Amino acid sequence: MRKRESLLALIGTVVLVLTLSIPVMQCAPAAEEEVTPPPEEEVTPPPEEEEIQYGGRLNVGFPAEEGIETLICDETWQYTEMGCVFWPLVYDQLWILGPAPDYEPLPRLATSWETEDGKTWTFHLREDATFHDGVPVTAEDVAFTIEYLPQADPAWAYPDCICEPGSIKAIDDYTVEFTLEATIGGPYPAAFWMPIFPKHIWEPYKDDMLSYANYPLIGSGPFKLKEFKPAEYIWFEANEDYWGGRPYVDEVVFRTYGSEDALYMALKSGEVDIIGYSGCSALVVDDFRETENIEVIVSPGIGMVWLSFNLYKDGPLQDLNVRKAIMHGIDRDRMIDLVYLGYAEKVDSFMYPELADHNPNLPQYDYDPDLANEILDEGGYIDTDNDGIRNDPDTGENLSFELIVPSDWTDEVKAATLIKEQLEDIGIDIVMKVLDLDTFYEYLYVPEEELYDIGFGEEEPGPHADWIWEFGRSYEAGGEGWNTAYYDNPDFDEALDKMLAEVDTTKRREYLYEMQMMMAEDLPYGFLVRPDLINPVRTDKFEGYVETMGGVSTWINPWTYFEVHLK
Amino acid sequence: MALKGFASFAIRKAIAAIITIFAIVCVNFLIFRMVPGDPIRMMFRDPRITAEQMQLVREKFGLDKPLWEQFNCYLTELFQGNLGISFWQKRPVLEVIADRIPQTLLLVVTALAIAVILGTILGAIAGWKTGTKIDSFILGISLTLYSVPTFCMGIIFLLIFAFQLAIFPLGGISTAASGLTGFGYWKDVLWHMFLPAISIVLWYGGEYVLLTRSSMQDASGQDYITTARAKGLKESAVLRNHALRNALLPVVTITGVNLAFAVAGIIEAETVFSWPGVGRLVYDAVMKRDYPLLQGTFLVFAVAVVLANLVVDLIYGYIDPRIKVGKSE
Amino acid sequence: MLKFLRELEKVKGFFQLLLTNKMGVVGLSIFALFAIVALFAPFLHTVDPSKTGAVENILLPPCHQFWLGTDDLARDIWSQVIFGSRVSLVIGFLAAALTVLVGTLIGLMAGFYGGRIEEVLMRIVDFFMMLPMLPLMIVLAAILGPSIWNVIFVVSIVSWPTTARVIRSQVLSLKERAFVEASRCIGASDSLLIFGEILPNVVPLMFAEAVLMVTEAIYAEAVLAFLGLGDPTTVSWGMILHFAFESGTMSRAPWWVVPPVACICTLILGFTFLGTAVSDVLKPGYREIRGL
């Protein structure tokens, strides 16, 4: 009985939070044009009075290149769409990020946690959680995972789970304690976004976790893996023994489609109920609006798009004025209209505009070709050889930059085409270089090899996004490959360290404001847009899709799978 | 005597095939050393990987040794059936490919069998009736089909039959998580196979029509046909017993060589219809820049073609003794 | 010199013969049509094919202003297809020229000198013919990176062996002919023999091979682009198709897919007709050599 209560309480929270979130969502400028009528479940009476039906199979479609082919716990669990949605269904975590708009840390396997200094953390676990094979989840399992998972693959090694050697202790069966190498301040506890593995199964593979095929998969999450067919589908079923009560749907099936067209057709024909992650292209949104039984949910995006200026490489890009002129030369409104068909908003920082930590006073680089021309003229960048391209006063060479973009990012390829066209007008030549994704990252993450001038950047910081600021940490101050601009500002590094260690929210915000200001003024990154997420969902069978930033199904939003139910 | 001749012929052919395979292995090794940039770096999407971690992986893949040693190592491993570890799937390449082979065989064997049978029959008719309206009709159709690349055909089929008319599935090999078994499952697979198979059949069948037709034309001009006709045999009997038999021999030889071309059709059809076979794997490996996997699929396709050629050669040599004598002496 | 001209007369005869073949005429007409289109591209109601347009013109169906509609950046598809024919033809011709040049040279060497040289060259040729072409092209294109020059290079390196084999067989039979023997007797040098006596006799064969190679190259460009190995900054038929396939709007905007597919198929068909006609004219010797 207690189980049911806690689940209902959870639903209550979700629905409440959702109701509260409606006005916020509508404030987002890009979504304004399209005021979605509040989805039905948000106006339904409180869940206590409602009879929610169990059953049904939720079919979810993914594009083939975002699917997973194995169950190995490698970086595909972080960097592919299916990978980062699938494991939160089958593995429980210590705590998870709550739904919009507060994104509070909500207890899962841990019922509570405490820390004195942000370094040593104690987590108290719930006693009624079991793995899918019936073995109880204990502190041993948590300690095992925290110790070995970050070593398995660098993709799991975040500062909030890298511990001092020997500091991980299972104090009793349901209490675990560990000491981090770095101090974690801020509103969120340590060990974020981490599946808890059953020690009794993984023990033999602890030194090379990637060598374990992980099938049959044993987790402790609300869903169990029923069948996995590589390159075809993943089939989940509800975990009847889940401590929080089983989810409403009986089954969830993830499957892939070879092309976007096929995926959209599958949604239209009812073969799938939702698109698993990135929703649909703005080009087809009208089609879906006209289709019966499909509702289009437009959410503010989770991804940010920017330009990284390679500041390591000698050349005119070192000149702040050139970078400013470039930003003034890019017509982001036209970009939003043409590439995203209006479904995007302009951004000026790594921080989402609706969050309280976003600095509202940042300098803006609006489209102003006259100003851009003026800046360049003043800087001495004059077209001396009359070929339409300005020349560097020092070397006499053309002001020509190589812009790299991966071929998989279709929208960004289009944006790059537009940037090239627009910068031509202010006498800057852009050589577009479209690379495959892996080569692109290889180029981008080693700026000192001078393989590019300007690179596209796209990340999904999410609401709990301290890690995104590592993009600004200088290499001298221990920065890792993320600093693709080769930004080097000791003041920034200092503010960053202080921010990370700061527990007090107001002080933290001051540092964050400061960091955002420095970045906006120094322009190592030219922030462009935040594309909306357009999620067409089928409403003939199911209701209760949960919406957060980034749409109904993302790495921060497993809620849809927990809450969706038959009509 | 004849058997001894055949044995030596077979041994010579087998040795030639082994040399070819060895050459393929060498080329395969060398091509992939031309990869620009650092393949280890490309294995990781995460930028935080340290130099030490990369070094570890480099050692794991044997990429830290000099080229000659790498080659040595590559050969030894290959001999033990180890094609390396897929960057993308983190498991042995051979395993990844082996998982996909049954699906590809199913599609290819079905499609090629239909293509060869249909193509040969139509080609024989066209060749026998050279110059007639039927001939020009068949020739025109097959030339046209032969000119349409499989992926173009696939896209058009997908557009019409799956998207617009919705009478065939959108891709894949079976209905996801259907729970079907036995007959029901195979019916489902056949339904999924229809469009990809037909795109291969049309293109490859077109080629067979052309082959058989010209072979038939040559055969029908031969003396023995004239003799047979002069003996007053029925036209159909001449066709069946004399012309067709002789016309088919060259068609059989060509089958082996043509497999090298059929591979293209497989890759294209599997990509368009997301058929989970080796062809689609080539596409995936390209997209993920998974070089060991790409290397592995290339090797598998090349060796398959060489072996198929060997088999065809041997069968042909066994059937037609003239070949042996002509080539060995 | 006079002799060379006489040989050229033979070549001319070959082309005249070709024009009496129905398929040859159809093939040549298709080719001529595309050549004219490519040559006069700027005058055929076209705009800059990579210039993005106005927001309201995104994905328009064919209309008065945009004869074949527009794509997802409101670019004119008609212009893209028209300018795309340039890319396809350039790739086709350069690749064919390079292939036939290399193939002929090696075929001549092997056929003329024989012995060890022939042995080695032919082994290489046999080896290459054994390789599955598309995977080899994919591998090379993936490693070399996307550009039309790489496509040309890749097609040539994969295709020259067939040409070499065909030319060699022809050279072998030519070498024994009386006129070559005669020239040899009067003390003609090797190079004179090769280029003065034998080469003109293989020109029709070279032409036949070139025709086949053009289809290879056009196909290769299209399929590599479709598989995502093309150069996205070049407007080619394969790239148009690739973008259409990636956009997820194929079923909504068939006008984006059908024209490039139709062009690829028609042009390949034209060259296939031409090739069939050429081999009909050269028959039966050519067929035997080529294995067709």
Image (cartoon, helix red, strand yellow):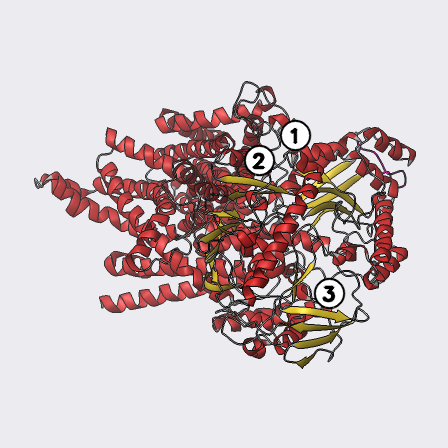
Q: Secondary structure at mark 2?
A: helix
What is the spatial separation of the Cα atoms under label 1 and label 3, in whole angstroms? 48 Å
Identify residue type, mark 1.
Answer: Thr
Verify whether residue C58 appears in magenta. Answer: no
Identify residue type, mark 3.
Answer: Pro
Pinpoint the chain carrying mark 2: A
Q: Which mark is residue A548?
A: none
Residue A185 pos. (x, y %): 80, 63
Q: Point out the image quarter for the C terminus of chain B.
A: bottom left
Residue A322 pos. (x, y %): 85, 40
What is the residue that sits farthest to the left in this orientation? B232
Residue labelled with disc 2: A283
Verify whether residue A396 appears in magenta. Answer: yes
Q: Secondary structure at mark 3?
A: loop
Pinpoint the chain carrying mark 1: C
Q: Secondary structure at mark 1?
A: loop
Residue labelled with disc 3: A189
In front: mark 2 or mark 1?
A: 2
Magenta span covers which residues? A389-399
Residue C150 pos. (x, y %): 59, 45
Q: Compared with residue B142, is residue B2 higher up or lower down, i.e. above or below? A: below
Residue A334 pos. (x, y %): 71, 32
Residue at (77% x, 52% y) in the render: A450
Identify residue type, mark 2.
Answer: Leu
Mainly helix, strand or loop, the magenta region? Answer: loop
Q: Compared with residue A231, is residue A168 higher up or lower down, i.e. above or below? A: below
What is the spatial separation of the Cα atoms under label 2 and label 3, in whole angstroms? 40 Å
Q: Residues within 10 Å of mark 3 (few under 14, many from 20)?
A: some
B185, B23: nearer the viewer: B185
Residue labelled with disc 1: C52
